[in-house]
Image (cartoon, helix red, strand yellow):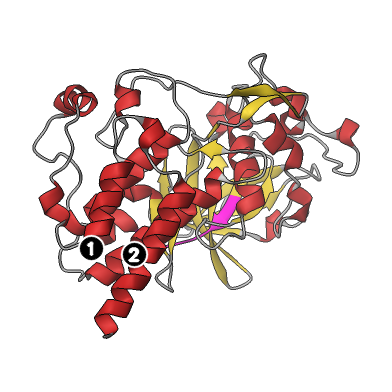
Amino acid sequence: MMRPGHTMHLLRGQDSDAVTHSADDLAGTKAPKRKRAKVIKHKINLTKKTDLPWFLRPETYERDSGCDLSEAVRLFKPEELEITCDNIDKLELGESLGEGFWREVYKASWKGRDVAVKVVKEDLLDRNDIIPRHVEEAAVIFPIRNEPNIVGLVGWCNTTVVVDYVPTPLDEFIYDLDNEVTVERALEIARDAARGLQQLHAAAGGPFAHTDIQTRQFLIDANGTVLLNDFNRVKYTGQRLHSGSVEGHEKCMFKTAVAKGKWRSPEEYENRDLDEKLDVYSISLVLWSLRSRVKPFPNYTKPQVYKKVPKGERPPVDAMKDYPKAMQQLIVRAWNNDPAKRPSSAELAQKIDEILTKYKNKKGT
């Protein structure tokens, strides 16, 4: 984490494909020193498959189960992005936006446009699981980077991913009661959120499950459009693959580590097999929160939620009573205990759009 008064710069090292990071102490009296970071220095020739580094080879991601992101990686063409290893040195990193276990995130400017830069932490570069995870996220976003409700992928180079900077998290907006959120606005947000989920579920190389849907995973751009964000926990939920081809008709299911938090589906709490329908359950809680203006189960501890939700406990429907009746019913369908009885994300988005249109027409009469 940078100290106040420091500016981060993304620099190209003496190696033509190495990216280095340094911090300049603007408040100091001495000339700043550049500290060379440990980076991946593979020469990447993206025109020849044999020249691809290990972390861009689809076979690196293949699993015996046939349930993996190898097809997404095969379709990933980083040279088609706006920012590549050839010009990433033009980025100047500004303020820190935060950090997680394995990455740091900075705000930056690119041709007058704000972007967010995600950089793998230096001390984790020796871990063989970190770089593939970084590539998988970029590969998943790549085919949907221009979709209207997805935070766009702007660039990629080895240990760095660049995405559009979207300043307003949905949770900060929706839980601040000073912000007016009319029923119509709530329906617009709900429609955008459902469309973002639909766009992910239908992505080439997928379908994919997001696996961490909650209000903080959605951002609001300057035009008021809601965008789905944060794809580093995505799972493949299509048919089993073998060397990039579909093998049989068996659908891929997965399990996660012990579910934490109050946004999880009943099947997660019970450690059952999972698919993209877990996202539909979780987004139902997001839609509920748009009217309740609180997070789900505020009066329960997490252990209580883990026990009660699989038994059918849900947030009170009365808290969203000013939604149109059809919207309330749709949300109740979406949080059904049985994943098979929940609507798909495509149906969810379509139904919300219909409800919104009907609401506007009725309001205008």
Question: Does the magenta segment cover residue 357?
Answer: no
Dots 2 and 1: beta carbons under 8 Å? yes
Point out the image quarter for the C terminus.
Answer: bottom left
| Nearest to the observer: residue 227 or residue 199 | 199
Question: What is the x, y in percent for residue 157?
Answer: 69, 45
* Magenta residues (range): 162-169
Q: Which mark is residue 355?
A: 2
Residue 231 shown left or right of residue 170 in the figure: right
Please identify the quarter of the rendering in which residue 333 is found. Answer: top left
Q: Which residue is outermost to the bottom?
A: 365
Residue 93 shown left or right of residue 229 in the figure: right
Question: What is the x, y in percent for residue 235?
Answer: 53, 31
Decide: few, some or many residues near mark 1? Use Cα within 10 Å; few <14, some 14-19, many ≥20: some
Question: Does the magenta segment cover residue 163?
Answer: yes
| Nearest to the observer: residue 98 or residue 247 | 247
Decide: few, some or many residues near mark 2? Use Cα within 10 Å; few <14, some 14-19, many ≥20: many
Residue 241 in sight from this viewpoint: yes
Which residue occupies 39% across, 65% down? 354
Residue 152 shown left or right of residue 44 in the figure: left
C-alpha separation, residue under disc 2 versus residue under disc 1 = 8 Å
| Amino acid type assigned to the residue bearing label 2 in the image | Ile
Point out the image quarter for the N terminus.
Answer: top left
Residue of label 1: 324
Residue 229 in sight from this viewpoint: no
Q: How many marks?
A: 2
